[in-house]
């Protein structure tokens, strides 16, 4: 298992473009149906017609999505990690993967990433 996790971490920088597309599809829900459709179109264009909001959620809820978020630029990390947490919650609630709901550690990490960006801007 450790070797599998190490491999996923090593491949994470190459997974970042996929994570960005998936995160945008997930976070588009905030902006309404038109934004979701637009993000879904970009997702399918970038990753293939077999991708959907569900597959984006499943990808971002797992280790690959989390590790890709960890590899992003500091300003981008909070947004990608937020998408990871949303996906993790949705997948956990709906049985879309073997993930647990976000916990206090997850929320603390998101707060720390957001604070780091805020501090950098000041």
Image (cartoon, helix red, strand yellow):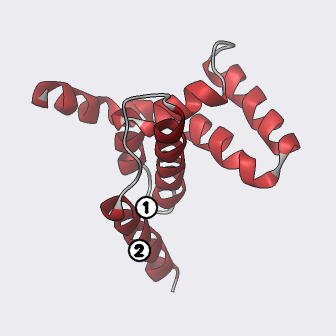
Residue 15's image quarter?
top left
Place of residue 27 in the rendered image (x, y in percent of width and height, measured from the top left): 66, 49
Tell me, yes or no, whether the two marked residues, 1 and 2, touch with CB atoms within 8 Å. Answer: yes
Q: Is residue 26 above or below residue 79?
A: above
Q: Point out residue 73 in the picture as x, y percentages from the top left corner.
A: 44, 55
Res. 18 in view: no
Task: Kindly identify the residue that appears in the image at 34 percent across and 64 percent down.
Answer: 104
Residue 43, percent across and down?
A: 67, 28
The local secondary structure at tag 1 comes to loop
Q: Is residue 5 left or right of residue 117?
A: left
Q: Is residue 86 above or below residue 92?
A: below
Residue 116 image label: 2
Residue drawn at the location 88% of the way across and 41% of the way down:
34
Q: Quadrant of the N terminus?
A: top left
- The residue shown at (47%, 70%) is 114
Question: Which label sits on residue 7?
Answer: none
Q: State the residue lying farthest toward the left.
A: 2
Give the distance between the C-alpha atoms of the residues marked 1 and 2, in whole angstroms. Answer: 8 Å
Closer to the camera in the image, 104 or 22: 104
Whether residue 120 is situated above or below residue 20 in the rendered picture: below
């Amino acid at each position: 298992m450790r070797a599998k996790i190490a491999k996923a971490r090593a491949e994470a920088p190459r997974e970042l473009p996929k994570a960005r597309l998936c995160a945008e599809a997930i976070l588009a829900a905030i902006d309404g149906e038109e934004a979701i459709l637009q993000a879904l179109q970009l997702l399918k264009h970038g990753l293939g017609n077999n991708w959907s909001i569900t597959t984006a959620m499943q990808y971002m809820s797992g280790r690959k999505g989390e590790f890709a978020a960890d590899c992003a630029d500091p300003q981008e990390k909070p947004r990608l990690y937020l998408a990871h947490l949303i996906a993790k919650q949705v997948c956990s609630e709906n049985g879309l993967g073997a993930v647990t709901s976000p916990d206090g550690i997850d929320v603390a990490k998101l707060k720390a990433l957001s604070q780091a960006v805020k501090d950098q801007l000041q």
